[in-house]
Image (cartoon, grey):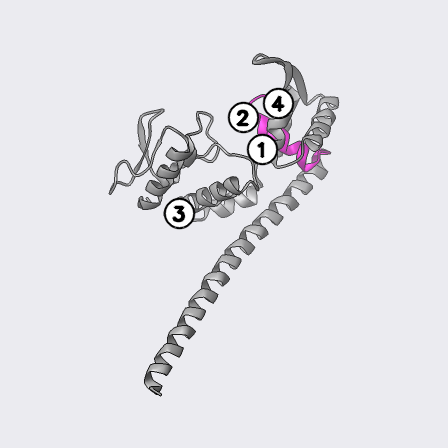
Amino acid sequence: MDLPLVQKTLDQKIQESYKKYMANELTEQVAFGLAKIGAALRTAQWRAGEQSGLTPTQIGILTTLHRLGADRVQALAGQLGVTHATASDAVAALHGKGLVEKSPDPRDGRAVLVGLTESGRRAAQDSGAYPPELLTAVARLRPDDQAGLRRSLTGIIRSLQESGLIEPQRLCVTCRFFRPNAHPGSDKPHHCAFVDAAFGDASLRFDCGDHEEADDADKARQWTRFLEATSD
């Protein structure tokens, strides 16, 4: 028996197992960290709700309408990741409080749009979309770390969207106007064909109002190209 060869093979297997363990451990720790941030956000939402007399879902609807404008209940449910029934109940409660109003959808007379009243706009502004503690924590990151985080979150959100865990989001990387790594070597490697402007990872959008979904083949090509791009 060739003992040196056996030892070498054993050492290789140990190294491979260790690398696999470290990769899994890193993945789990990142997921744990994201879960902790999610828990902190839910706590902040409940605290804000106690002060305003609104539930987290109701606050979410107000801030979503303030950010995106009037929309259907089904769309609001998708944005918040809740059932249609939950969103409908929350809208009914907000309507009763005079914070939202309903109007016919000009695109479909049978459908109804939910929009903010003046009181609803003030309530949305007072509630705030994000806890100030979270904004402070993110602001403390260096600009290049914020840009890297934005790039990483883009990948995570895209993956969750494709798996069906969250509703489709209006991401740069899934938009037909997105041109990833169109300017390689630049601090603004990407290009938006809608506004005809270059931009970097720090300007990637998670919810762009001008988003138009690319077809599946283009999205696949864009994602491959995006992964080749250097971070700014």
Range of residues picked out in magenta = 52-71
Query: Tag 4: Cα neighbours inside 10 Å, few (<14), some, or many (≥20)?
Result: some
Rounded to the nearest angstrom, the CA distance separating label 2 from label 3 is 26 Å
Q: Is residue 68 magenta?
A: yes
Tell me which numbered mark, 2 or 1, is placed earlier along the sequence.
2
The residue that disc 3 covers is 148
- Disc 3 residue type (three-letter): Gly
Please, what secondary structure does the residue beneath circle 2 have?
helix
Q: Is residue 76 magenta?
A: no
The residue that disc 2 covers is 68
- Disc 4 residue type (three-letter): Arg
Residue at 75% from the left image edge and 22% from the top image edge: 96
Query: Tag 2: Cα neighbours inside 10 Å, few (<14), some, or many (≥20)?
Result: few
Query: Tag 1: Cα neighbours inside 10 Å, few (<14), some, or many (≥20)?
Result: some
The residue that disc 1 covers is 79
Please, what secondary structure does the residue beneath circle 1 have?
helix
The answer to whether the residues at label 2 and label 1 have Cβ atoms under 8 Å apart is yes
Is residue 125 in view from this perspective? no
Tell me which numbered mark, 2 or 3, is placed earlier along the sequence.
2
The residue that disc 4 covers is 72
Residue 92 appears at what percent x and percent y?
Answer: 73, 25
